[in-house]
Image (cartoon, rainbow, N blue to C red):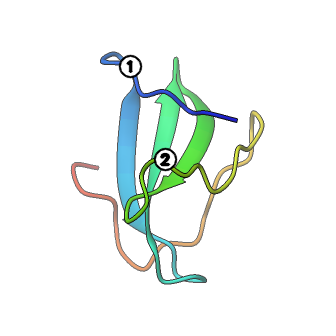
């Protein structure tokens, strides 16, 4: 399933401390819509439903 990033969407970049990959969290209207790996931005690694929040960070996301 594709995750499109619109201008009004909030995108948080972070390091996944389990996989070691740099990933983007895409939020639409405050709801987490998807996670995309940055190194292969055209491949959506997982689409997750409402309410599932990743709590595993190696550091704080930039800008937060």
Image coords of residue 57 (percent x, y): 48, 72
Q: Looking at the image, which is closer to me, 7 or 63?
A: 7
* Tally of marks: 2
Q: Is 2 left, or right, of 37 in this rendering? A: right
Q: Looking at the image, which is closer to me, 8 or 57?
A: 8
Q: Looking at the image, which is closer to me, 47 or 2?
A: 2
Q: Is 38 left, or right, of 2 in this rendering? A: left
Read off the residue under disc 1.
Answer: 6
Image coords of residue 15 (percent x, y): 41, 72
Q: Quadrant of the N terminus?
A: top right
> Marks 1 and 2: in contact by CB < 8 Å?
no
Regarding mark 1 in the picture, which secondary structure is present there? loop
Image coords of residue 49 (percent x, y): 78, 37
Query: Which is more N-terminal, label 1 or label 2?
Result: 1
What is the number of the mark on residue 25?
2
Instruction: Identify the image quadrant of residue 61.
Output: bottom left
Instruction: Identify the image quadrant of residue 58.
Output: bottom left
Identify which residue is drawn at 74% across, 38% down: 51
Find the residue positioned furthest to the left. Answer: 63
Badge nearest the viewer, 2 or 1: 1
Residue 61 vertical position relative to residue 57 in the rendered view, above or below: above
Residue 41 vertical position relative to residue 16 in the rendered view, above or below: above
Regarding mark 2 in the picture, which secondary structure is present there? strand
Identify which residue is drawn at 39% across, 63% down: 14
Identify which residue is drawn at 37% across, 47% down: 12
Q: Is 28 left, or right, of 22 in this rendering? A: right
What is the number of the mark on residue 46?
none
- How many other residues sit within 10 Å of disc 1, few (<14), some (14-19) or many (≥20)? few
Q: Looking at the image, which is closer to me, 47 or 55?
A: 47
């Amino acid at each position: 399933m594709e995750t499109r990033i619109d201008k009004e969407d909030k995108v948080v970049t972070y390091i996944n401390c389990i996989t070691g990959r740099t990933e983007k969290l895409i939020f639409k209207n405050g709801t987490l819509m998807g996670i995309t790996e940055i190194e292969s931005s055209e491949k959506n690694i997982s689409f997750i439903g409402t309410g599932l929040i990743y709590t595993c960070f190696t550091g704080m996301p930039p800008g937060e």
